[in-house]
Amino acid sequence: MADFSQFTDLNFVIYALVALGVFLLFTGVTQLLSRSENRLEAKNRRLRMIGKGRSTEEVLAILKPDTGGGILTRLPFIGNLPQLLSQAGLTLRPGAFVLLMIFATAFAFLLGLIYLSLPKAILFALALGVGVPVSVVRSKRKKRMDQLVGQLPDALDLLARGLRVGHPLNTSIGAVAEEMADPIGTEFGIIYDQVSYGEDLTDAFQQFADRVDLEDVHYLSASIGIQHGTGGDLARIVNVLSRVVRDRIMMRRKIHAISSEGRMTMYILSAIPVVIYTYTSIMTPSYYGGVADDPLYVPMAMAVVVLSVLNFLTLRKLVNFHI
């Protein structure tokens, strides 16, 4: 009886340590990927860095890191990780992020071996250590890019007003960088610092368009490039572009609202097979486990998975519209 009690206590300690490790890992990832700020702090990261005494070269090195080349671009699934981290607004280095994923994968694999078989533990580790962090970064990237597009018309209006009263273009860009919050404030601040540091204005806007890779920003870069080469009323061009971007945002929101029922149908139909399989496996393990040794089990299971994925992709294509 004493041996059984000691064994139970040992299991309890192991489970408690595993739970503590998961909690610390989750907390660490959360702190790395999201940093809360209060209202007393500056509007954007660039102003905070300048307030701390950072030089223009240091600001550009941190906020505009090199996202091209390197061995990461050759890896599948995470080949665009440097650009994703930049677009998500994270200053974490790609190498450090990969090390974090490796640590999370190894920890999840050891955790999975306690409850799962070796193949399932490998899949669990890859999903938790690679799939979840990359999905979080992609989600933050989408949220930040949507926020940037939403701020772009106001930034262009402010830019056009500065040009109308006679301010130089670089001065108007600096006003946008100081008045607007992140992410547009920091991005225009990077352009302002690049031009102040000696780079050409058109190259700075083109790098901004390549950095965020948004269609509306490419329009802005092309407008600046054409006006810089041929001349013309830049304030009017920027004002027209602001109206176009604002109308495109309104159209996207209308279509998003109209297609909401279709998206809900997509999620429900895609989740039904997973829910049924999970519920049946928990309530009646022998329902699928009893035929797992049959030669047709694996091919039929793979066929079901492939058809379910194709169903999700087809429905997603039908309810997503590019404007």
Image: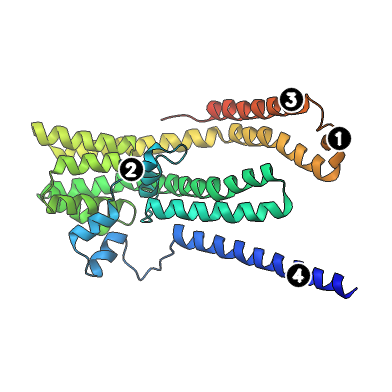
User: The residue under label 2 is which amino acid type?
Assistant: Gly
For this view, does 313 lie left or right of residue 147? right
- Where residue 245 appears, as percent x and y from the top left, is 32, 37
Regarding mark 4 in the picture, which secondary structure is present there? Answer: helix
- Residue under pointer 1: 290
Q: Nearest the camera: 193 or 27?
A: 27
Q: Nearest the camera: 315 or 111?
A: 111
Tell me how far mark 1 sits from mark 4, CA to CA.
34 Å
For this view, does 76 lie left or right of residue 21? left
Mark 1 neighbour density, 10 Å: few (under 14) some (14–19) many (20 or more): few
Asked if marks 4 and 3 touch (Cβ < 8 Å), the reply is no
- Where residue 280 appears, as percent x and y from the top left, is 81, 40
- Residue under pointer 4: 10
- Residue under pointer 2: 70
Q: Earlier in the sequence, mark 3 or mark 2?
A: 2
Mark 4 neighbour density, 10 Å: few (under 14) some (14–19) many (20 or more): few
Q: Nearer the viewer, mark 3 or mark 2?
A: 2
User: The residue under label 4 is which amino acid type?
Assistant: Leu
Q: Quadrant of the C terminus?
A: top left
Q: Nearest the camera: 110 or 80?
A: 110
In the image, what residue occupies the spot 73% across and 52% down?
115
User: The residue under label 3 is which amino acid type?
Assistant: Met
In the image, what residue occupies the spot 86% across and 42% down?
284
- Residue under pointer 3: 300
User: The residue under label 1 is which amino acid type?
Assistant: Gly
Tell me how far mark 4 sits from mark 3, CA to CA.
42 Å
In the image, what residue occupies the spot 29% across and 65% down?
48
